[in-house]
Amino acid sequence: MNVLGLETSCDETSAAVVRDGATILSNRISSQIELHKPYGGVVPELASRNHLQLIETIVADAVQQAGLGFAEIDAVAATYGPGLASSLLIGLHAGKGLALSLGKPFVAINHMEAHLYSPLLSSAGVPFPLVALIVSGGHTILAHSTGIGRHEILGQTVDDAAGEAFDKVAKLLGLSYPGGPEIDRLAQQGNPAAIAFPRSMLDDHSHNFSFSGLKTAVMYYLRKNDAYRLEDVCASFQEAVVDVLVGKTVRAAEERRVQTVAMAGGVSINRRLREKLGAAGRPRGWRLLLAAPDLCADNAAMIAALAYHKLRSSAPTDWAVDVAPSVGLV
Ligand code: KG4
Ligand code: ZN
């Protein structure tokens, strides 16, 4: 079954064709990073206008790159939430319109569940049960998953998301948007033990996260210290985020007695995070599932792949489905 997926929840316009939930035939992604860079963050009005301009071409490219015609598309899927309302509307309605005109079923997909599914896309066999860490610009979620659509949220951030913390600290340091890749790059030349930034909530017994105190700690450090090594601040900040993410994931996996751990979302590209999660998993014998870099950030392949599994287990989505900007993972 060839599923055409659409993703426009934030600042990426993406369309992809995935066969049988596993073989990516195309995954066309147009990033708006340059458009939003001057503003230091995503401007919703600009984002939706850009999606509207691009969606038709991106969809046509995705179908063509898959080596197919529209007649060979068996179902259409699009993200309905969470995300920016005006951006979600573009993809959701384009997807519904396409499905209607092709006479094919339509599936509305939860963006966070698709992120969770992205590292599973290329894994052989069914890897459930597992603990998943989803770390993106808008979310930080630890979940226990026992199947497609069967997720329990163990914890999430009580304030800033991990990616948001990277972006805000990068801004304090005068680095460009998005801050995660910049900090990741500079941290490679820095000393992660140079500054002892707080590991908020690491030792409490919840699975929740808090990153706004860490951001404030960096702000005070910069105010008090005229001369600092940028690379050391980046490495020390990153280390604090990574220690909390890894520490909490280890505790959740041990508590739930799972042997499979998956990590997804834009922040999961982070080199230090991959390194330390890998090091934590090795002695415990985990099967660690990580998505390829182009599947970590927002993309439509994860939408199309998940839609295939949804269609196998449930009916297509009702045409009346609307965007849900604040919907959670469950
Ligand atoms: O999943 P994503 O592409 O979009 C959302 O759904 O939010 O995540 C974007 C976030 C941004 O905050 C960005 O700074 C962060 O992922 N990010 C990184 C890295 N690459 C992207 N954070 C840390 N290290 C990276 N290498
Ligand atoms: Zn995302």
Image (cartoon, helix red, strand yellow):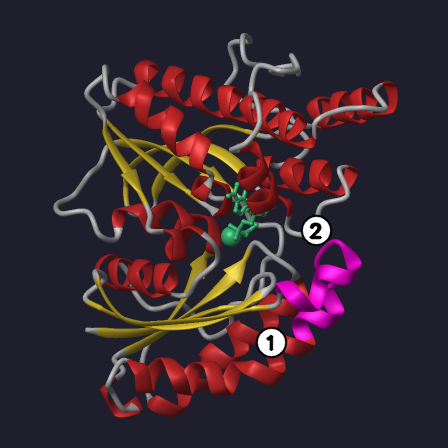
Amino acid carrying label 2: it is Ser
Q: Look at 66% across and 66% down and name the residue there.
A: 34
Q: Is residue 142 left or right of residue 24?
A: right
Of residues 276 and 71, the one nearer the viewer is 276
Mark 2 lies on a secondary structure that is loop
Q: Look at 23% across and 16% down and name the residue there.
A: 284
Q: Is residue 174 above or below residue 18?
A: above
Quadrant position of the N terminus in the picture: bottom left
Q: Is residue 190 left or right of residue 144?
A: right
Task: Of the two numbered discs 2 and 1 on the same chain, state the one appearing first in sequence.
Answer: 1
Amino acid carrying label 1: it is His
- Decide if ligand 1 comes within 8 Å of the CB at mark 1: no
Q: Look at 43% across and 36% down and name the residue there.
A: 271
> Which label is found at residue 51?
1
Magenta stretch contains residue 101: no
Q: Are marks 2 and 1 in contact (CB under 8 Å)?
A: no
Residue span colored magenta: 33-48
Give residue 210's position: percent from left, percent from top: 64, 24
Question: Residue 46 appears in which quarter of the rendering?
Answer: bottom right
Magenta stretch contains residue 46: yes
Q: Look at 72% across and 28% down and name the residue there.
A: 215
> Which label is found at residue 176?
2
Of residues 234 and 205, the one nearer the viewer is 234
